Image: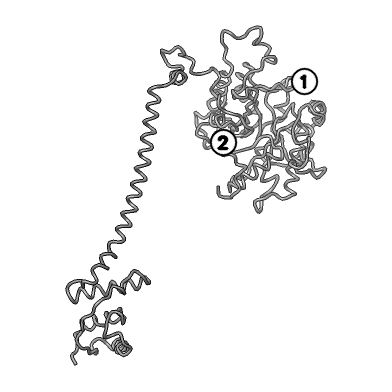
Amino acid sequence: MSFLSERGSQDCLLRSHFCDDSVFGDFGSSSARGDENDLQRKPPHQVALGPIEPFTVVNSNLKDRGSLFSRFKTFVRICMCQKQNGSTPPNLKPWLGRTLSRRPRVSKCVLYLVIAYLSILGLIHFFGSLLDALEMRFPDDIDWVINRWGQVGELTEGFGQWLTDATGDVHPVNCHSHNDYWRSVPLYAAVRAGCSGAEANVWLVDDELYVDHKRDALTTNRTLQNLYISPLLDLIGKQNPLIKYHPDEDYPLYPPEENPLNGVFDVDPTQTFVLLIDFKSSGPALWQQLDYQLTPFREKGYLTHFNGTAIVERPITIVGTGNAPFDLLTANDTYRDVFFDTPLQEMADLSSQWPNPNRAQDSTRGHDQSGPDSPASNILDSRINPAYNKPAGRGQGKFVTTTFSNASIYGPFNSYYASTSFTKSIGHIWGSRLTQEQLQLIRGQIRGAHQRGLRVRYWSLPGWPIGLRNHIWHILIREGVDMLNVDDLRHATERDWRKTKGWWY
């Protein structure tokens, strides 16, 4: 009996581990397997084996079947056979060739299919572009007129634009651009989206009105005049051009009440644009400067105003909030063109359980300034009574509570909005849905404001998750909120957010 070297014994052990009785003839019997087990239990230097007899691999045992480990063992056998004999056995070559060539064939087929698919798409795109080019080369009469409409040298030169088409394709919606001055293009972004209202935080510094969220962020060029007053004058001026055909006997220039001015939106020229001025500095001092800077609007008749007996709605409506002084805004009994933003939480009508507006017809959901629920005369009489103690300096910017709670002084002749913080007034929302108590409070506040002829607006709405925000928007519109306070203009005006039910989209 001869002893193998350490390397030879290891090769033998490796071969004996990966081979079964279908490959190695001498190791196919149970006795051979027993000897093999004995060999594995001994250290390599103590294993004594006879000469390794040649073995063959049968094709039937190399079919593509079994587990991945079986295929690995077959690969090891091939390598051992090549090492022992120096070449691959003849009966192994066909199987090896098929095994090694099968995967490349599949890869080539997939590659050819992808190339064919892309080639077909390219041909379709090429022929489509070719047909479009041919169509442009041979236009009909209508295409010829459309393509050359308004160009220099054509008969239609100068017809390319209407005088009032700055907002010709914009449809106004009842949304308020919250913190509008933070947008990349203040005012114009809101108008382009269709919002009929915008907000500007105003600070008085050295007799100038600056716009920004905080005082330490003010810059010299971001003034109320530059961001809002001048652009609005320009927009309204373009919507009401003075040409040589105007005025005439059918459309006289005066009086304006009989010839109302066009608003910002060409699609709906009667829609007023609400500019909400948030008084951040001292109310009386800021009011004097604001009253002075609104003079160009007054001279052109652009401002919605109270003429002593009724409200005359015009293209621009100015509303004061924050530290706006109520007594100064309403000091003039015969004319006022800056209205107050009243505290909505003081107007809640909780006298009864209000029904779901989707299930019952409720006449108090919509505001009507001339309706029987609007105490216009009583409001005016109580407001001008010298013996009445007026709440000076009350506003929405600083949420405070006072002993005064008589909301009857607020009405359409001195106020426009009835606003409050949604989070502080209604509370937090748990479980992504409003409770019945919260719904009743919303309904009571909305009806209390509408009975006084005021428009309801909630600020500090939840902005995330998106699904919760859209749900709150839907509930507020359903319950009768007049102006939706939004930060995301695109989702609020261009998408049907009522269909968004999830939390993350």
135 displayed left or right of 209? left
Identify residue type, mark 1: Thr
Query: Callout 2: few (<14), some (14-19), or many (20+) C-alpha neighbours within 10 Å?
Result: few
375 displayed left or right of 487? right
According to the picture, the residue beneath numbered tag 2 turns out to be 494
**Residue 309's disc number:** 1
Q: Quadrant of residue 403?
A: top right
Q: Residue at the location (52% across, 37% down)?
A: 217
Q: Which numbered mark, 1 or 2, is in the foreground of this view?
A: 2
433 displayed left or right of 362? left
Depth check: 5 or 141 in front?
141
Identify residue type, mark 2: Glu
Instruction: Give the mark nearest the N terminus, 1 or 2.
Output: 1
Reply above or below: 55 against 150. Answer: below
445 displayed left or right of 93? right
Q: Residue at the location (19% across, 85% down)?
A: 5
Q: How is the image coloured?
A: one colour
Q: Residue at the location (60% across, 33% down)?
A: 199
